Amino acid sequence: MAERKAGVQRNTLETRIQVNVNLDGGGTAKFQTGVPFLDHMLDQVARHGMIDIEIVAEGDLHIDAHHMVEDVGITLGQAVAKAVGDKKGLRRYGHAYVPLDEALSRVVVDFSGRPGLEYGVEFTRARIGEFDVDLFREFFQGYVNHALVTLHIDSLRGRNSHHIAETIFKAFGRALRMAIEPDARMQGVMPSTKGSL
């Protein structure tokens, strides 16, 4: 199988972001977004997805974190889409349930070629430290729009907002890992009856 690595740079008047991914990595993470809680969550994706992710970003954090979080989602989605390539031989679908104490989340992903987000998450507070929890949806919307995946995220239970967020991102990483794994029985085959994704 060809090397599944990609680098994407996104520069706007609001943010400047460089993302590098290796889908067949060991979960190595290096982040410099200026949003510490986002970095903590992205670390979960790398570690549990066994994806090497490096993100270096700067932007208008003096306003708030909205543009940074959304644009990191966009750029990560672009990098994953580029690294996945033509999708031949992929499992295509991935799913994971992840608990953390009282919290339990489920994430299901389909590398369908069609962007779609179903987001069933209610947090018990508006902020985790300085982080506005509304921005998680913006991150995932940006990701699906540019990775061209269908993504269902459901928080099934939880009281502690930090725990809820962590289970979502860990499950996201695990679901990605499953979906992008090569399927030995599908070598060179497009995982779709349409013949394309």
Image (cartoon, rainbow, N blue to C red):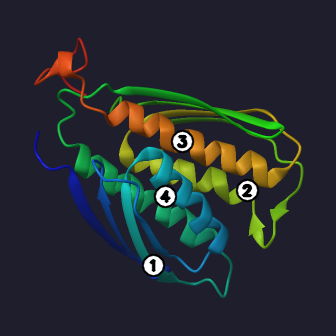
Amino acid carrying mark 4 in the image: Gly
* Left or right: residue 154 compared with residue 146: right
Q: CA distance from mark 4 to mark 3?
A: 13 Å
User: Mark number for residue 128?
Assistant: none
Give the distance between the C-alpha atoms of the residues marked 1 and 4, in whole angstroms.
Answer: 12 Å
Q: Quadrant of the C terminus?
A: top left
Q: Position of residue 54 (x, y in %)?
A: 38, 68
- The residues tagged by marks 4 and 2 sit, at their Cα atoms, a distance apart of 14 Å
Task: Using a 10 Å C-alpha cutoff, classify the residue at mark 1 as few (fewer than 14 neighbours), some (14 to 19) or many (20 or more).
Answer: many
Q: Residues within 10 Å of mark 4 (few under 14, many from 20)?
A: many
- Pointer 2: residues within 10 angstroms few (<14), some, or many (20+)? few
**Which residue occupies 19% across, 15% down?**
185
Residue sitting at x 82%, y 47% = 123
Residue 158 rendering spot, x and y as whole percentages: 84, 39
Q: Amino acid at mark 3?
A: Phe
Residue 134, numbered circle: 2
83 relative to 112, above or below: below
Residue designated by label 4: 73
Q: Earlier in the sequence, mark 4 or mark 3?
A: 4
- The first of marks 4 and 2 along the sequence is 4
Residue 25: image location, x then y, percent: 30, 53
Give the mark nearest the N terminus, 2 or 3. 2
Where is mark 1, residue-wise? 57
Residue 50, position in %: x, y? 40, 48
| Mark 1 residue type | Ala
Q: Residue at x 47, y 50 (%)?
A: 143
Residue highlighted by disc 3? 172
Circle 4 sits in a helix, a strand or a loop, which is it?
helix
Q: Nearer the viewer, residue 41 or 109?
A: 41
Disc 3 or 1, which lies upstream in sequence? 1
